[in-house]
Amino acid sequence: MDALLAAGLWLGATYLRFQSDRPINPITNYYWSLLFVVCWWWLTNAFMDLYSRPLEIAPLKQGKDLVKASCLFGMGMMSFGYLTKETLDPGRSIVLLVCALNPVLLFTSRAWVRWIEVFLRKKGYGRVRTLLVGGGPLAERTWDRLTKRTLREHQVVGVLKSAENAETNASFVPQNLVGSLSQLPNILDHGGIDLVVFAEEKMAQSEVLNLIAGFPNHHHVHYRIACDDMSTVMINRSAGVEEIDGVPVIHLGAAAPHLGYEFVKRTLDVAFVLLLAPFALLPLLVSVPPIRMKSGASALFWQKRIGLRGKEFWMVKLRTMRPDADEYDDSPKEPGDPRVLGWLGAWLRRTSLDEIPQLWNVLKGDMTLVGPRPEMPHLAENYEPWQWRRVMVKPGVTGLWQILGRKNLPLQANLEYDFYYIQNRSLLLDLVILIRTIPVVLFGKGAY
């Protein structure tokens, strides 16, 4: 639909321009420009998350995303018109008309699709087959939201009690839908479930994540965690907190990236490394001599880390700690750590220049640009089952928790961010993380 709207708008504006008496360019110029218009329309919408279908999307959030997409589209179109003035020269009148009508068509098309979705759901089509886990007040409120106060997007097919002897209020849950949590593996194996919502106050988030990690073969199933604890909501708000009619839920995807994701990701990794190599060489050449003089040891620091599927590899960094410091001790958590190599080591850590040699690990294939940070072996030994999901993907130079909290968050929260990334990884999410890494590095947020 967006391709047709973009093409129709551009060709319509071109037709109006051709009706004027002023001299105009060859029609082929506008056909070549059409390719950019359609692709840029797609990219801006994708970047602003207009192609995701979050359940019960809030109209206000979608409205804000539409406005952002329209602004980004307009800036790109004006830049395109300026840069191609001497070649394609689409003309300001056409570009301005397309930019002005872009938000109108975006809002109209999304409203039309939404109206069709609501109409079909009222007829019983397109609902998400949902399983609710929990039996207390939070589960009762979540059931009420899922079944009564929404557009009825959810078809709740059952409620599983978190404990065999837990009481379930018959006034809000039909007893024929009630089961126990021990039945969850068999229900998922049987198929037909699209979403599992955990809404039990007595279950810790780590328990829920351990359960999810135990279902690696159900890639089509999405998971959500309803929560009353505002600290949990605040920690996770930047990663994946949504709402089901007022009940905050942490959204975990289905851990199934798009077809060809790994191949494209590896290709982009190699391309980015080769592109960045000339710019990375200069800071390396400048940093190595003073590091060697100040430390009296090699400027490159090699450390054993855990990689894909638990395989160990040697990660390389610039040396920022004194040679006599325990290389597997915890990283500095605050400024002024005596183990750091003076002002030079602190500066390298704050600017993240010490991470530049890891481009070599990316080129070798041990690491990727975006992913969970590689863990030290002795820390990985104490992982819970859900935390081992981190080693099911390649470790990265940067990741989700680096841009959202870095060392300002506790280790537990960092691992939860990694879990969220693994469940929702995509090329678009990788691109967003790479872009948002730039200001974090420039301002040294959370780096000591």
Image (cartoon, helix red, strand yellow):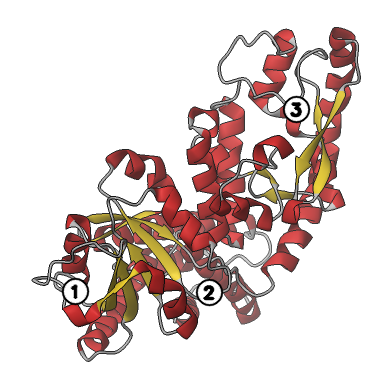
Looking at the figure, which quarter contains the N terminus? bottom left
> What is the CA distance from the residue labelled 1 to the residue labelled 2?
25 Å
Q: Is residue 411 visible?
A: yes
SS state under label 2: loop
Q: Are marks 3 and 2 in contact (CB under 8 Å)?
A: no
Percent of width and height locating residue 143: 20, 68
Q: Which residue is mark 1?
A: 147
Q: Is residue 60 above or below residue 415?
A: below
Q: Is residue 81 visible?
A: no
Q: Nearer the viewer, residue 301 or 141?
A: 141
- How many numbered discs sit on the rendered protein? 3
Side of 325 where 81 appears, left or right: left
* Residue 191 image-quadrant placement: bottom left
SS state under label 3: helix
Q: Which residue is mark 2?
A: 218
Viewer-side label of 3, 2: 2
Q: Which residue is mark 3?
A: 354
Of pointers 1 and 2, the one earlier in the residue sequence = 1
Percent of width and height locating residue 163: 31, 61
Look at label 3 and name its amino acid: Asp
Q: Is residue 227 above or below residue 234?
A: below
Of pointers 3 and 2, the one earlier in the residue sequence = 2
Look at label 1 and name its amino acid: Thr
Percent of width and height locating residue 114: 28, 77
Of pointers 3 and 1, the one earlier in the residue sequence = 1
